[in-house]
Image: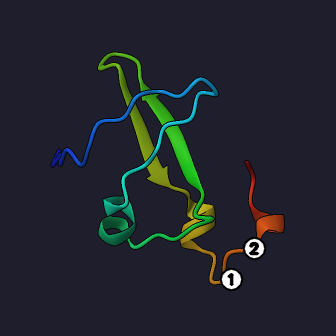
């Protein structure tokens, strides 16, 4: 597995984590991209993967189609 540390951020009160801007350039994603969230129970890691929903979508960002 190739890992690149982009930055470190604290968990916010409302449980948000700020994603580094480098994600946009390295993964070629944009605002509204849907991520699947996994947890590695043995490794204690949080894993974000671009959802198939976003990979297959050719439509531009639309707030109505985005889950929060």
Mark drawn on residue 4:
none
In depth, the one of 15 and 58 nearer the eye is: 15
Q: Residue at 63% across / 65% down in the picture?
A: 32
Q: Which label lies toward us, 1 or 2? A: 2
Q: Is residue 1 above or below residue 59?
A: above
Q: Is residue 62 left or right of residue 40?
A: right
In depth, the one of 59 and 41 nearer the eye is: 59
Q: Secondary structure at mark 1?
A: loop
Q: Is residue 8 left or right of residue 16?
A: left
Q: Residue at 46% across / 44% down in the picture?
A: 18
Q: Residue at 36% across / 60% down in the picture?
A: 23
Mark drawn on residue 62:
2
Looking at the picture, how far across and down is residue 62, in whole percent?
75, 73
Q: Is residue 38 left or right of residue 28?
A: right
- Label 1: few (<14), some or many (≥20) within 10 Å? few
- Which residue is the extreme one toward the right? 64
Q: Is residue 4 above or below residue 50?
A: above
Q: Is residue 52 left or right of residue 5?
A: right
- Which residue is the extreme one toward the top? 42
Q: How many marks?
A: 2
Looking at the picture, how far across and down is residue 38, in whole percent?
49, 34
Q: Quadrant of residue 56?
A: bottom right
What residue is pinned by disc 1?
Answer: 59
- Label 2: few (<14), some or many (≥20) within 10 Å? few
Measured in 3D between alpha carbons, the distance from the residue under mark 1 to the one under mark 2, in whole angstroms, is: 8 Å
> Are the residues at dot 1 and dot 2 in contact (C-beta closer than 8 Å)?
yes
Q: Residue at 68% across / 82% down in the picture?
A: 59
Locate the N terminus by quadrant: top left
Q: Secondary structure at mark 2?
A: loop
Looking at the picture, how far across and down is residue 63, in whole percent?
78, 67
């Amino acid at each position: 597995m190739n890992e690149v540390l982009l930055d470190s951020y604290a968990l916010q009160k409302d449980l948000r984590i700020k994603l580094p801007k480098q994600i946009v350039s390295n993964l070629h994603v944009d605002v509204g991209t849907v991520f699947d969230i996994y947890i590695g129970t043995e490794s204690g890691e949080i894993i974000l993967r671009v959802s198939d929903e976003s990979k297959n979508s050719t439509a531009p960002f639309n707030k109505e189609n985005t889950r929060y």
